Image (cartoon, grey):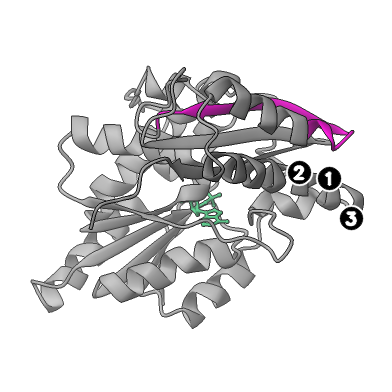
Amino acid sequence: MQIVTSPRAMRAACKALQRVVPSQTIGLVPTMGALHEGHLSLVRASRQQCDRTVATIFVNPLQFGPNEDFTRYPRTFQQDCELLEAEGVDLLFAPASEEMYPAQMQTIVDVPEIGGRLDGASRQGHFRGVATVVCKLFNIIQPDRAFFGQKDAAQVAVLQAMVRDLNFDLELVVCPIVREANGLAMSSRNRYLSDEERKEAQALSRSLCSVQRAVAEGQRSVTTLRETLLHELAAAASLRVDYADVVDPNTLESMSELPASALVAVAAWVGQTRLIDNCIVHTEEVAL
Ligand code: AMP
């Protein structure tokens, strides 16, 4: 696995990949490192669907607020490299912050409406940071497909809008959430949790399961489903809810009526750690 740290060298390396066999497809897996099975599932999907797989590791300062965990975000670069190498990644881009954001940088990518909902509402400027860095990665690497996790459902909605609006010639592939055996969605931030907090954190996935159950049993009232979420989350005494909502998966707008597919999304603080989780519920059988 070749490791590249400057955008200019990365662009050259990606062009070189394409020159070897002009028709070969490139899959991109962007990450912030501290890799776990969720990240590796994206790499495996890319390896299945594309000829070459490029991963990135960049803890993007632009998507962290001033009081967030940028400085203490886990950084496990050596171990990450070993994992990516073992999965057959061809090229790893791991730039320094100054390489991605030189002092003269002026341009920001903003998806203001969608990017202001869910996590965008509680983390001001977060999705501007995400859209800007992903836009830069797309331009540097020019992938045919880019792989993202359903775990970050709001991020997916923002990036789908960006790809559409800015005419990127690539396909976003959304991969399912990988969970621990107890239901907790895998996250680099799970490393922050104590044993006690890890137990409390299971309330997030439990709350989603209870909504799925309620919908399967015929519940269609969004108000009732929101109450179900809050009721389950309240059972974990130390957990502080950020949001718990049923929204349109594409626009992230809150809704009063349950549509054919809805995104059920929760975010909560467990101690100092902010965790997110979600599921999609379907109210109609999908016709084959
Ligand atoms: P991050 O390193 O947290 O920025 O995540 C990089 C990519 O991995 C994003 O597309 C995430 O949605 C995805 N990802 C993170 N956790 C999971 C998970 N548990 N299952 C599937 N994908 C995930």
- Residue 200 is tagged as 1
Which label number is shown at residue 192? none
Give the crowd class for mark 1: few <14, some 14-19, many >=20 residues within 10 Å.
many
- Are the two marked residues, 2 and 1, in contact with CB atoms closer than 8 angstroms? yes
In this rendering, is residue 140 above or below 78? above
Q: Say what amino acid the circle numbered 3 marks.
A: Asp
Going from N to C along the chain, the mark reached first, 3 or 2, is 3
**Residue annotated with mark 2:** 203
Which residue sits at x=39%, y=23%?
114
Residue extent of the magenta highlight = 233-248
Residue found at x 66% / y 43%: 210
- How crowded pointer 3 is (Cα within 10 Å; few <14, some 14-19, many 20+) is rated as few
Q: As shown in the figure, which amino acid type bears the numbered disc 1?
A: Glu
Is residue 140 in sight in this rendering? yes
Residue 234 magenta-highlighted: yes
Q: Residue at x 24, y 75 (%)?
A: 51
In the displayed structure, would residue 203 be above or below residue 56? above
| Residue at 57% over, 44% down | 212
Name the amino acid, label 2.
Ala
Question: Is 106 on the left or on the right of 178, as rendered?
Answer: left
The residue at the far front in this view is 218
Q: Quadrant of residue 52?
A: bottom left
